[in-house]
Amino acid sequence: RVRFHHGTSELIGAVSPIEVVKIEPGQSGFARIVLESPILAVLGDRFIFRRLSPMVTLGGGTVLDINPPRAKPQITGRLELLKSMETQDWRETLLLLARRKGIHGMSESEILSQSLLSKEEVRQHMKTLVDTKAFARLPREPFQVIEAQSLKFLNDRTLHTLEDFHKREPLSPGMSKEQLFSHVYKNSHPDVFKLSLDQLSNENRIAVDQDRVRIQGQSVFLTESELAAKKQIEEAFLRAGLKVPFLEEVLSSLKLPRDQARSLVLLLSKEKKLIKISESLFFHTETINRLKSILVEYKRKKNQIDVGQFKNLTGISRKYAIPLLEYLDRERVTRREGDSRLIL
């Protein structure tokens, strides 16, 4: 433990040599300094430290890494970074800083706080590292990057996670983006997630269908009982027209486990045979197309329609009319204006 002097500040702290057990008098080396309270320091600042008592000067040094990780990293990686900072090999420093940030990625502001470079110099070095494939740039301003090996780690883990998912749920059209993010990317920046999916998709290794992600070429193979249940579900919604049963009613009529039956509904949605209006309401695509044709015909007489008129036109109750009108608003078939809808 020592008295640490930096500018006009004096704080109590502890000094621990990094690459050796002890730094002898007259020698120099790298050390980690932990202070009892924070200070404002930048790369290149000078400091000295003294004994607690008597106040004899023990040595001094130069600030290098102002934001080291709390957990002790591997000695080799830490020494490489400190040596690059000491010699001001900035390109190597940026590479090692990004490697330390790992799967989270590193922003321009984080680099500026860790170096003596100007913004223009930082951008030039980062651009060079992107051009040489050492970094991958995120679709974000200001400049943000992730080290190439960290991105590869995430890509590989994504593929492995999707393969496991397909084995567990062979009927599913794919893993939801939300589920994939929580499994693989929860410690990453959201832009890293988008970059990884874009890269794997461009390499034809995965396919992204709206909010679902699957391995490219992954097909759903159904047993005879699953094919029969799938046909039964589709026919139930087609026969019902606009007065469809709630989803749970249809699922309970099947001889399949509930999760398996729900996967068949998702498959029908992916095949665009069913349209999801709300969490519990699905309609057959042919029924929705007929509804749109009815509205086109109605528009020839009147271009606005309210809930009551919509109910009379379609012969359905309010429990179906409201969700359908909200769906038509989202699809820009209608637009709400007060208590009525303008038919677009």
Image (spheres, rainbow, N blue to C red):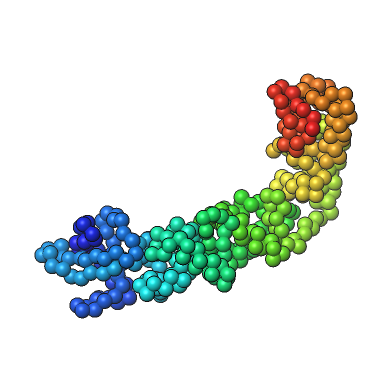
Residue at the spot 31% in from the left edge and 56% down from the top edge: 40
User: x%, y% of residue 258?
Assistant: 71, 45
Residue at the spot 43% in from the left edge and 62% down from the top edge: 118
Q: Is residue 170 above or below residue 266?
A: below
Q: Left of 204 or right of it: where is 134?
A: left
User: x%, y% of residue 111?
Assistant: 44, 61
Q: Left of 12 or right of it: where is 187?
A: right
Residue at the spot 21% in from the left edge and 79% down from the top edge: 26
Query: Who is closer to the viewer here, 305 or 226?
Result: 305
User: x%, y% of residue 325?
Assistant: 75, 30
Placement of the C terminus among the 4 image quadrants: top right
User: x%, y% of residue 235?
Assistant: 86, 41
Q: Is residue 228 above or below residue 310?
A: below
Q: How many marks?
A: 0
Residue at the spot 75% in from the left edge and 26% down from the top edge: 341
Q: Quadrant of residue 198?
A: bottom right
